[in-house]
Image (spheres, grey):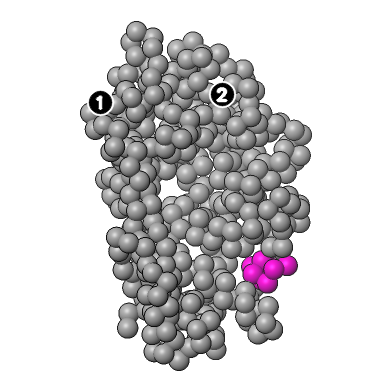
Amino acid sequence: MRLSKKLKVINDPVYNSVSVPSDLLFDVISHPYFQRLRRITQMGLSYLVYPGAHHTRFHHALGAMHLMQKAIGVLKSKGVPFTEEEEEGLLLAILMHDIGHGPFSHALEYKLVPLHHEALTLAYMQALNTVFDQRLTTAIAIFKGEYPRTFLNQLVSSQLDIDRLDYLKRDSFYAGVTEGNINAERLINTFAVVDDRLVVEEKAIYSVEKFLMARRFMYWQVYLHKTSIVAELMLSRAIERASELIRTGVELTVDEPLKGFISGLNGELGNDEPPTKAMLDAFAQLDDIDILSALKKWAVSEDFVLSFLSSSILNRSLLEVRFSEQPVTTQFYEETCEQVASTFKLSREEAVYLVYTGTLWNRAYDASKEPIRILFRDGSVEDFIKASRYLGTPAFLATHEKNYICAPAL
């Protein structure tokens, strides 16, 4: 792979420095589609719980690219061959794997466009492939999991991939918690390839166990923290309320490009319909700043529901969250809606914007997916769950659930 003649090193607080090893990678990073990630918060509204968690998808993408370089180097040192095209394709695939995220990352998934962020990522990669003379074709095949060398696909997306290794380490660093502080370099140093599949050497089995438990702890401690969850639910409902008001003819102050999406002008896509170039360009103009600006305007709206939601998010005066072992019954939900409607003098249709129920779930290891494979000294390979004898199968396979109801404190 040709060395970049442009910027070669970027400072990073987690890894000290990140190198950009080719001009193509540098040019992709410099493109407006990618630069937008500087304005997309990695952890949504988690900064309302962990004030340091203001890092962005841009940080994460560069960090993942850095770890991928490490992984390529380790595998090459163990005799795994790579073409220059494959090396650059891997780095491009992991660099761009989150380019389709919208404002506040997962918080507004499907709310502005009825597409998952991975579908948008693929659309952006395909658009950039045209810009860069089809030089992203290998990266796209790897991202889609269709490249003929399976382990390359696994490095980008699997139960032990480069994406997860970076976000656990990075998110725990910025949040200031220790639960996700994994030894990513240690794990990468034990990567190997057997029968075209990624494996981890036996000596790292305890590191794999720590990685899986760290992921579980990070979800309960950070990603699924009740305050983060309720704040993101409120943000989602604020967007829904604004969209409803606009559709019914209410004059609402919304700047472009957000207005086009919440009014449905850019969001009327079927799940199987690819986004147009015009829609991708418009979505690329959206970021956290647009949402925060809208919330500040809506906080003084004459509509009580929209004003309540917007000002509550801005001032961190959030709905009360109550957990239960059993799912919330329909009767209890309806009674809560009636109480909220009575207290705030709202209709039942308005009250549902302030009452939410659902279930949070968390599982360390999914036995139905491609397994993490452990390579033993005798050359045999075994599924991690069978190989792990320390914590045992139930600790990793168990699905933990929490049922919740969110409502104003009455």
Q: Residue at x 76, y 34 (%)?
A: 133
Query: Does 296 sit above or below residue 274?
Result: below
Which residues lie in the magenta part? Answer: 257-265
Check disc 2 and report the residue beneath it.
150
Residue 255 is drawn in which quadrant? bottom right
Q: Is 261 included in the stretch rendered in magenta?
A: yes
Q: Residue at x 37, y 67 (%)?
A: 328
Check disc 1 and report the residue beneath it.
389
Mark 2, Cα crowd under 10 Å, few <14 / some 14-19 / many 20+, is some
Q: Residue at x 24, y 33 (%)?
A: 391
Mark 1, Cα crowd under 10 Å, few <14 / some 14-19 / many 20+, is few
Q: Quick one: 142 or 378, which is closer to the camera? A: 378
Q: Amino acid at mark 1?
A: Arg
Could you tell me residue 407's position as x and y percent?
A: 38, 75
Q: Say which element carries label 2.
A: helix
Residue 82 is drawn in which quadrant? top right
Note whether residue 265 is visible: yes
